């Protein structure tokens, strides 16, 4: 079976909840076709990375959550405030571009 | 001549009209370079799939319109309400990801 | 070293400033991994192409700014009003699709 890795971009604060639902729909539909999803929060959506309750549906197998450090700084969020298990990258957009270069499929929510 | 298949994502209700114009501009510009476009409506943009008048510019050669079933359910839209000729998929985001895996080019409007 | 070309789409007027910051963050992070970035302004974001002050951070090595002619016409902007050094294409969305076909990586801001 062909499997896929998907890098998801979530940018807007007001779209975070809907976007998390879309990620879950994606995982539920692709099942074994999916190898891994990395969900990158940046820009105004970065606030979500401090909210464990909001992120709860993403704490499951095959999903990794990533926070953009540039956005954390811009929004004055301390790294200690992040929910557990979140990976920090210097630049969310660079992460998205590099993952594609490695063959990951891009989804911009 | 190299030809392309393009999968288009339309997510926001308030961007539907502008996005449909962009799809038409794409088709008009690419002409024979274009093999097929699939336009996937999901999230709040799903309402467009019930509005034949709004979709009218998309009823032409090489364009296929797709509705996300998850979004139909979330918005309480019955499948019978859909305009004619629309294909339903379980998950719009999974459709977008799978098409890319098959070599389609991605455009997020 | 593997180098990358990236085509960036900026569509919404209200997101122009934030998006320009993201492009600069991308360039600063990727450094030598980056060969070239093309930033395509279209839809309501097209107004930015007339504002040299706003675009200033993009006037640097490896970044090219592109304006969509369809959007210029739709917004009644004369080509003479564009800031210097901007490339005009018939269709911004067609440019984004063609660049991907040539192997450029896509980033939708």
Image (cartoon, coloured by chain):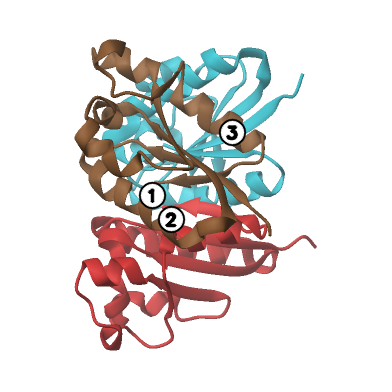
Chain colours: A cyan, B brown, C red
The image's mark for residue B26 is: 2
Q: How many marks?
A: 3
Question: Is residue B75 or residue A49 the one in the foreground?
Answer: B75
The location of residue C8, given as percent across then percent down, is 48, 59
Circles 1 and 2 in contact, beta carbons < 8 Å: yes
Q: Residue at x 66, y 60 (%)?
A: C102
Left or right for C65, reference C42: right
Q: Quadrant of the N terminus of chain B?
A: bottom right
The location of residue C80, given as percent across then percent down, is 28, 89
Q: Can see residue A38?
A: no
Q: Can see residue B13?
A: yes
Q: Circle 3 sits on which residue?
A: B99
Secondary structure under tag 2 reads helix
Question: Is residue A51 or residue C23 the one in the foreground?
Answer: C23
N-terminal of the pair, mark 2 or mark 3, is 2
| Quadrant in the picture for residue C62 | bottom right
Secondary structure under tag 3 reads helix
Secondary structure under tag 1 reads helix
Q: Badge 2 local density, few (<14 within 10 Å), some, or many (20+)?
A: many
The image's mark for residue A13 is: none
The location of residue A25, given as percent across then percent down, is 46, 17
Q: Residue at x 72, y 63 (%)?
A: C3
| CA distance for labels 2 and 3 | 18 Å
Q: Nearer the viewer, mark 2 or mark 3?
A: 2
Subunit of mark 3? B
Subunit of mark 1? B
The image shows residue C88, relative to residue A104, as above or below, that is below
| CA distance for labels 3 and 1 | 17 Å
Q: Residue at x 64, y 25 (%)?
A: A36
| CA distance for labels 1 and 2 | 5 Å
N-terminal of the pair, mark 3 or mark 1, is 1
The image's mark for residue B23 is: 1
């Amino acid at each position: 079976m062909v499997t896929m890795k998907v890098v998801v971009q979530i940018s807007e604060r007001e779209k975070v909840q809907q976007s998390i639902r879309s990620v879950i729909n994606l995982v539920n539909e692709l099942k074994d076709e999916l190898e891994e999803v990395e969900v990158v929060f940046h820009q105004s959506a970065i606030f979500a990375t401090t909210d464990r309750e909001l992120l709860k549906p993403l704490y499951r197998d095959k999903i990794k959550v990533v926070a953009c450090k540039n956005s954390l700084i811009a929004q004055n969020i301390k790294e200690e405030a992040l929910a557990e298990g979140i990976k920090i990258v210097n630049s969310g957009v660079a992460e998205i571009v590099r993952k594609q270069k490695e063959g990951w499929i891009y989804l911009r929510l």
